[in-house]
Image (cartoon, rainbow, N blue to C red):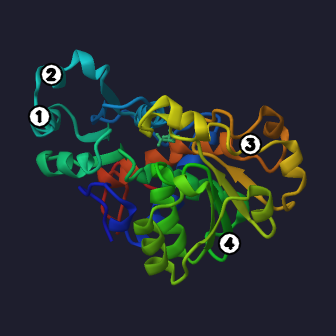
Amino acid sequence: MSLTGRDLISLDDYSLEEITCLLDLAEKMAAALAEEEPSTFTPLDRILATCFYEPSTRTRMSFASAMLRLGGSTICMQDVKMSSASKGESLADTMRMMSAYSDVIVIRHAQEGAAAEAAEAASVPVINAGDGTRNHPTQALTDLFALRRRKGTLQGLKVGLCGDLKNGRTVHSLAPVLARLGNEMVCIAPQALALPEEYLEEVERAGGKRPAETEDLAGALAGLDMLYMTRIQQERFPSPEEYEKYKGVYMLDATVMAQAPEGMIVLHPLPRVAEITEQVDADPRAAYFEQAAGGVPVRMALIALLLGLVEEGGGKKKYAF
Ligand code: NCD
């Protein structure tokens, strides 16, 4: 098994063995980062380019942090309005150029399929950091990392997915891989924001069981091992009026948490808007900030594997993990 030189467009392209290996390496990265004087990482003559055509805080910054922690450098397309895209340059041409300027490209784009198109044109590995409402595979890896750390396993769990399941790409990446790993899911969403049929079918194909569906958050809590809250995706709504109808439809507060199982952790890809109150932050079951922090070791592991920096099968490579 080797991830060297590969892209990451969708987790569907990675085997469970590859995903587990990546998460294991992320654990080692986290342990190395926790050392008082990390001696594992030495200067690295590689460049990571971040090309974000949509807003981002955590994903872009954690990719940059991960590359810097590995000892490498980053270049960043700061503001798309200031780049040649505003002059009409095609995504493919931009990617051809980025391949000459960097060793790995991270792209986020509003258009579904843009990351695959970028990978087609680029000659270096391309990582999808979100393409429209379709995929967000590195968030799903970060979610799995947090889940495994808290629950000690990634199978046989019952997971509630709550919020904007129609537009939320993190759920579209997470649900199928949870099903492949052998977990059961319940979808909690207003009918208009329900998980689209294509994903329900994908989950069923992957895990053999169609997720249950409900609009009632409190009623779905019993037996959950993890509740995955998501933001209502304002930017995907056709009008502000339409968004207003669903804004604040779910609010996880201390009262709801009082009805939740003791062992039910709460994850959220962040940013949160109104769906989890700050009261919940102090609840020991709230794991969303540690989840976001785990994005750094997870992305370090991914970059190291795609760039072939990790010693495999005894060959001499950059890092001996
Ligand atoms: C998510 C995204 O961009 O899809 N954010 C993230 O990367 N952590 C979730 C969201 O914006 O709601």
Cα–Cα span, label 2 and label 3: 42 Å
> What's the residue type where badge 1 is placed?
Ser
Cα–Cα span, label 2 and label 4: 47 Å
Query: How many numbered badges does the structure rendering display?
Result: 4
Specify whether 94 is left or right of 9: left
Q: Position of residue 159 (x, y in %)?
A: 66, 65
Q: Nearer the viewer, mark 2 or mark 3?
A: 3
Q: Are marks 4 and 1 in contact (CB under 8 Å)?
A: no
> What's the residue type where badge 2 is placed?
Ser
- The residue lying furthest to the bottom in this view is 208
Image quarter hosting the N terminus? bottom left
Q: Residue at x 36, y 55 (%)?
A: 305
Q: Residues within 10 Å of mark 1 (few under 14, many from 20)?
A: few
Q: Are marks 3 and 4 in contact (CB under 8 Å)?
A: no
Q: First in sequence: mark 3 or mark 4?
A: 4
Q: Which structural element holds mark 4?
A: loop
Q: Residues within 10 Å of mark 4 (few under 14, many from 20)?
A: many
- Residue beneath label 3, please? 251
- Residue beneath label 4, please? 157
> What's the residue type where badge 4 is placed?
Leu
